[in-house]
Image: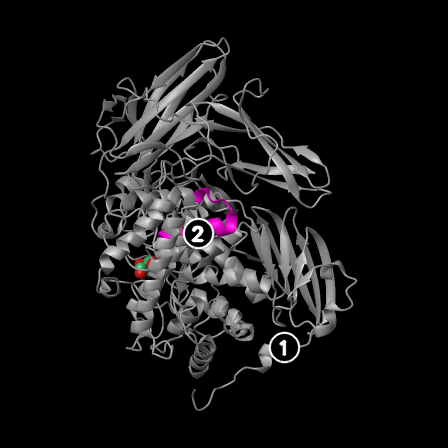
């Protein structure tokens, strides 16, 4: 038996993070036993555990998240281990683990310093450090605004990009901690270059078109170097007026517009740094997961276009920066421009709107490897100017993303489906750059809460997202504090005002999804009051006359059934008031369940009652007396079924099917309806029809995009028209993950592994794959908080079903066999049938195999297309 993946707050050996909450988790592998009997966590300040600060004792602990409360000291490394006992009498202890605190509440020795911020050339703050004695341990605590990049003797410290990350800097900002022990020996030049970033560049909805930064125009830096020597003495060096400022050759930087560098400029003579006012927001230990280079891509070709352009094609849309080797005569201007799609064989970037997305470099005649420092681009194509010979081997794309471990995968026997899955993965990678953004390329790239919540379940299947969303929820809570519980449509709001149902409901849906997927209730504990503040805010707006229905809402955003019939319209036809009430009730239910989870039963009851009264209101306004939803839109039927609103669900199911069939099985759903479409069809036993939508290759559909060469998920169903021409709408990103939320259903139903709310974090999982001949085969691997689940199915001759399942240690699988013959449970020699309850095989930890001839051929769904309902209901 071994103990692996030991984490604190779901982070691997975290240094300098915020530890207001301490939650420990781990996984067990290679055990002879099946279940964990006991565990024990011990925490000490020294590696040898001379003084133990915390000892849980041998007791029952939750491996998905055990909260511990101890008093921590600043800048201290804590060591911990976990020991686990299995039901087979095994005992195993983890390797020695650690986490290290940041400065906590201690005052900073460093002061905020600045320089002349009118000067365009980006500043480099220097401090020369020279120590005669050997250094035992050294740390750098630092925050530089807008972006900072620290280097020692010209070598970048750490491997992170876009630090100190994206927050509402009026409310809070993060400092990072770096271990610089190795770098700090001897004489060193600590040099910190600042860029504009989210703080000082263009960011935020209201300033997209004008150039005033939301937060400030002033560059600022605070840093503290703490050095301990081998002789046990120490020294602290903080930012002060003794620091010197020189100017780099970066003339301009902006997230949307790119970077300008003039290599001919010499570093300027040093000016003294100046003290400045403290930062506006509270300087806080980091929550953000590092943004790193997660992959490198080489161009697949160089193209010379009809418009006489040289364009590199990466073969993959993505987000990040690049390295480009050049050597051009002095004074040459090299210009790179970034785009997502070619049009008529030529370079195009009209859909980036006001984002210039460029890199300009003025050559000094020497060879250089160009690499931007303070910007990022969303791109597949690069138009290159000013380079004598454009060669693909000179260019490398550095894909940037918040570094989240890949935990889930689905692979099928269908190439187009596999491409779709990859497209979802790429849209996640490109848009999870510190905040869950809508898109990575145009002048937006903001934390749209609606997009974030719609996709959060999918993301939790694919990546270890807990700490990423924990940071986003912290951002959200900061906004709510200023807005009386209201959740703005984008977080950080960055001057945006206003909220909407389904967008603001992210405040409840995201924490609940984190609890569902990772099983750690500390996220609910941390955010219960914020979740509650959101529903209480709605309650105030709702008043006594259902005011929430009539305020602004985005509705079924990008749905295709707008009454005008205009395919470029923004909203679907489903009434906003219905959507608003349904999401309100859902959030209230989440608050009630959360209160129950935290043992606050009076509060639970109070919100259950509120949920009941909202339901009555919905029925009164949006349902007929006999219980049918009044609106005949696909999304309205989906809402009615998914949220259990109909008095007569059977009738509602028929109406949904009728409405889909009479629309010739063409989906009309937007942000609200689309994520529900396939799950609801599966819930009502019509996975055959869900497969129809999945495999539909015409507009609108997921494979329509794949057929047109998409390598990421598009914002609109028709972002690109069948001719290959881009939809001229002013809002059209080719890298927008919201409709990628289909992958959550695919993992649950095609792949066949889904979480169970009563036993979250995959302690128990629903195993219910539903095969289809067009997929023919599927393999799902989910490295969940409870262990690694595997499910693999394969069809032989369309009718024989082969299944392999692995249930991890301390878990239970609940397996439903698709189209199984009635007598399958009778000849039960296979261990799969050891414990069957109501047709569900209850599986203990272990690996299982089975094959049988299905009662219904997996070709069924092909045969049923098209099937019309004539004459109506
Ligand atoms: C964004 C979204 C967002 C929407 C609000 C768009 O500009 O890109 O995806 O949710 O506005 O409706």
- Depth order, front residue of 706/580: 580
Please tell me how crowded label 1 is: few (under 14), some (14-19), or many (20+) other residues with Cα within 10 Å: some
Residue in the picture at 35% in, 60% down: 611
- Depth order, front residue of 240/486: 486
Instruction: Name the spot of residue 184 as percent of width and height, x first.
Output: 46, 19
Residue 510, magenta (yes or no): yes
Please tell me how crowded label 2 is: few (under 14), some (14-19), or many (20+) other residues with Cα within 10 Å: many
Q: Quadrant of residue 16?
A: top left
Looking at the image, residue 269 lies above or below residue 18:
above
- Depth order, front residue of 136/487: 487
Q: Residue furthest bottom?
A: 871
Q: Identify the disc placed on residue 512.
A: 2
Tally of marks? 2
Looking at the image, residue 128 lies above or below residue 115:
above
Give the CA distance from mark 2 to mark 1. Answer: 37 Å
Q: Identify the disc placed on residue 588.
A: none
How was this image coloured?
one colour
Residue 666, magenta (yes or no): no
Q: Does residue 184 appear to the left or right of 173 in the view shown?
A: right
The label nearer to you, 2 versus 1, is 2
- Quarter of the image for the N terminus: give it: top right
SS for dot 2:
helix
Q: Quadrant of residue 244?
A: top left
Range drawn in magenta? 506-523
Mark earlier in primary sequence (2, 1) = 2
Q: Identify the disc placed on residue 859.
A: 1
Q: Does residue 814 appear to the left or right of 468 in the view shown?
A: right
- Quarter of the image for the C terminus: give it: bottom left
Residue in the picture at 46% in, 61% down: 740
């Amino acid at each position: 038996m071994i103990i692996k993946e030991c984490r604190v707050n779901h982070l691997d050996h975290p240094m300098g993070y915020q530890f207001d909450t301490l939650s420990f988790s781990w996984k067990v592998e290679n055990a002879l036993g099946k279940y964990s009997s006991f565990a024990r966590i011990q925490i000490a300040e020294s590696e040898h555990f001379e003084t133990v600060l915390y000892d849980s004792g041998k007791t029952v602990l939750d491996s998905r998240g055990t909260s511990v409360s101890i008093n921590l000291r600043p800048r201290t490394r804590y060591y911990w281990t976990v020991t686990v006992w299995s039901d087979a009498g095994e005992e195993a202890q983890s390797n020695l683990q650690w986490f290290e605190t940041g400065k906590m509440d201690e005052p900073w020795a460093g002061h905020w310093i600045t320089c002349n911020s009118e000067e365009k050339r980006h500043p480099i703050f220097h401090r020369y450090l020279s120590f005669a004695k050997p250094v035992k341990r050294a740390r750098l605590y630092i925050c530089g605004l807008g972006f900072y990049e620290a280097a020692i003797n010209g070598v970048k410290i750490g491997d992170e990009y876009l630090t100190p990350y994206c927050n509402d800097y009026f409310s809070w900002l993060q400092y990072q901690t770096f271990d610089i022990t190795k770098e700090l020996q001897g004489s060193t030049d600590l040099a910190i270059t600042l860029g504009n970033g989210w703080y000082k560049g263009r960011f935020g909805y209201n300033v997209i078109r004008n150039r005033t930064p939301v937060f400030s125009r002033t560059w600022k830096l605070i840093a503290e170097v703490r050095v301990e020597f081998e002789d046990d003495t120490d020294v602290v060096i903080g930012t002060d007026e003794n620091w010197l400022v020189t100017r780099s050759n970066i003339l301009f930087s902006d997230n949307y517009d790119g970077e300008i560098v003039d290599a001919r400029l010499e570093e300027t003579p040093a000016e003294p740094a100046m003290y400045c006012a403290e930062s506006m927001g509270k300087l806080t230990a980091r929550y953000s997961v590092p943004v790193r280079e997660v992959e490198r891509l080489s161009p697949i070709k160089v193209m010379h276009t009809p418009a006489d352009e040289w364009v590199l094609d990466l073969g993959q849309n993505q987000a990040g920066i690049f390295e480009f080797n050049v050597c051009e005569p002095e004074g040459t201007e090299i210009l790179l421009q970034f785009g997502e799609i070619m049009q008529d064989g030529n370079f195009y970037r009209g859909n980036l709107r006001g984002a210039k997305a460029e890199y300009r470099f003025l050559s000094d005649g020497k060879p250089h490897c160009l690499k931007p420092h303070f910007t990022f681009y969303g791109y597949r194509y690069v138009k290159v100017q000013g380079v004598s010979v454009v060669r693909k081997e000179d260019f490398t794309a550095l894909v940037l993303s918040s570094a989240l471990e890949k935990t889930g995968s689905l692979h099928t026997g269908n190439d187009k489906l596999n491409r779709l899955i990859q497209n979802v993965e790429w849209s996640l990678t490109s848009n999870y750059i510190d905040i869950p953004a809508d898109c990575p390329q145009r002048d937006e790239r903001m934390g749209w809460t609606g997009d974030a919540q719609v996709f959060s379940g999918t993301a939790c299947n694919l990546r270890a997202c807990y700490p990423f969303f924990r940071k986003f929820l912290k951002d959200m809570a900061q906004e709510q504090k200023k807005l009386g519980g209201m959740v703005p449509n984008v977080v950080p709001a960055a001057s945006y005002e206003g909220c909407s149902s389904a967008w603001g409901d992210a405040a409840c849906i995201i924490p609940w999804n984190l609890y569902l997927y990772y099983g750690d209730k500390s996220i609910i504990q941390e955010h219960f009051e914020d979740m509650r503040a959101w529903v209480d805010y709605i309650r105030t707006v709702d008043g006594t006359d259902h005011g929430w229905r009539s305020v602004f809402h985005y509705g079924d955003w990008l749905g295709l059934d707008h009454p005008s019939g205009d395919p470029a319209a923004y909203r679907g036809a489903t009434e906003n008031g219905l959507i608003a009430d349904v999401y309100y009730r859902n959030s209230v239910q989440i608050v009630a369940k959360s209160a129950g989870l935290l043992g606050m039963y009076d509060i639970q009851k109070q919100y259950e009652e509120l949920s009941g009264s909202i339901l009555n209101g919905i029925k009164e306004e949006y349902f007929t007396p006999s219980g049918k939803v009044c609106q005949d839109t696909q999304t309205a039927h989906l809402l009615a079924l998914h949220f259990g609103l109909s008095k007569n669900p059977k009738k509602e199911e028929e109406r949904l099917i009728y409405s889909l069939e009479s629309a010739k099985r063409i989906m009309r759903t937007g942000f609200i309806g689309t994520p529900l479409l396939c799950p609801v069809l599966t819930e009502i036993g019509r996975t055959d029809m869900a497969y129809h939508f999945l495999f539909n290759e015409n507009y609108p559909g997921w494979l329509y995009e794949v057929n047109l060469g998409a390598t990421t998920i598009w914002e609109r169903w028709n972002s690109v028209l069948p001719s290959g021409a881009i939809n001229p709408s002013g809002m059209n990103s080719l890298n927008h993950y919201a409709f990628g939320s289909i992958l959550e259903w695919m993992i649950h139903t095609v792949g066949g592994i889904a979480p169970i709310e009563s036993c979250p974090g995959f302690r128990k999982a629903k195993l219910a794959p539903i095969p289809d001949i067009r997929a023919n085969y599927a393999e799902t691997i989910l490295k969940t908080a409870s262990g690694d689940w595997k499910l693999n199915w394969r069809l032989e001759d369309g009718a024989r079903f082969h299944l392999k399942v692995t249930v991890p240690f301390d878990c239970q699988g609940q397996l439903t066999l698709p189209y199984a013959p009635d007598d399958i449970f009778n000849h039960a020699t296979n261990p799969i049938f050891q414990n069957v309850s109501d047709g569900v095989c209850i599986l203990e930890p272990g690996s299982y195999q089975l094959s049988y001839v299905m009662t219904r051929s997996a070709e069924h769904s092909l045969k049923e297309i098209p099937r019309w309902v004539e004459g109506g209901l």
